[in-house]
Each structure stands twice: as structure tokens, then as C-alpha cells.
Image (cartoon, rainbow, N blue to C red):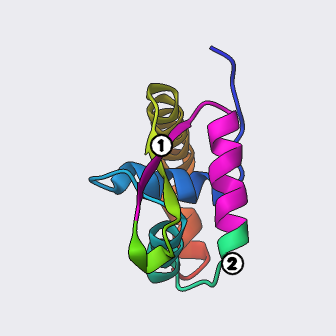
Amino acid sequence: MKKTILGELEELVLLVVAASTEDVYGVPVMDELQRLTGRNFTISAIHTTLYRLEEKGFLSSSLGGATTERGGRRKRLFAVTASGGRVLLEIQQMRQQLWQAIPERKFQLLGI
């Protein structure tokens, strides 16, 4: 399998979409990221990241139904693909290995 490196925002967006129980669109992804990280993200940054992840094959998208609250516009809904799920598991395993490699005394030396 071809390895693909994800940037921090890509990883966070992919995690939020994976954690969702339904297909999601940009605004709920942005809101959840802001809630979980305490950081501000622009909707354009979230949309760019969602489309980039789709190009990489980690997300799929489809158009939802039109709603009156959006002036009849349809939402583009995103879902994690099997490739997206695999890359998240690879990232999780790699991070666990890195954390386990840190000797406990390093944290003590740092006073944490």
C-alpha cells in the first residue's frame, strides 16, 4: 500500500469525520474541531481539507437533499472510506509506538 503522509489538519478532519455517526458536511466538522481543540478554523480551510482528503481517497462525498434553510442549496456530505480508516489506524499505531519509546524518566526530568 502506498504510504501517504497527512498534515495535522488533514488528520484532525479525518478523525472528526470518522467519529461522526452520519455523513457530515463542512460546518459541523469545523464546529467539532473548534470544540475539541479550542482553536479557530475557517470554513474554507475545512472545505479545502475535505476535498484534499477526497482526492487522496480517504473520504468519499455525495450531495444531500436541498433544504429551504440553505436557500435550496444542497450539502456535500463526506464519509470515511476503507483507505481512510486504514490510514487512521496506521497513524494511531505509529503514534503509540513513539509514545511508548519515551522513557518515563524523560517526563520526570521535564517536571511533568
Q: Is residue 55 above or below residue 14?
A: above
- Is residue 64 visible to us here? yes
Q: Secondary structure at mark 1?
A: helix
Question: Which stretch is magenta?
Answer: 45-66
- Is residue 8 visible to us here? no
Query: What residue lies at 43% left-to-right and 43% top-to-bottom?
Result: 79
Q: Which residue is mark 1?
A: 92
Badge 2 density bin: few <14, some 14–19, many ≥20, Cα 10 Å: few
Query: What residue lies at 44% left-to-right and 34% top-to-bottom?
Result: 85
Near-viewer residue (95 or 75): 75
- Which residue extends farthest top? 1
- Residue 80: give x, y in percent of width and height: 45, 40
Between disc 2 and disc 1, the foreground one is: 2
Q: Is residue 99 magenta?
A: no
Q: Is residue 53 magenta?
A: yes
Near-viewer residue (75 or 67): 67
- Residue 11: give x, y in percent of width and height: 59, 52
Query: What residue lies at 27% left-to-right and 53% top-to-bottom?
Result: 21
Q: Secondary structure at mark 2?
A: loop
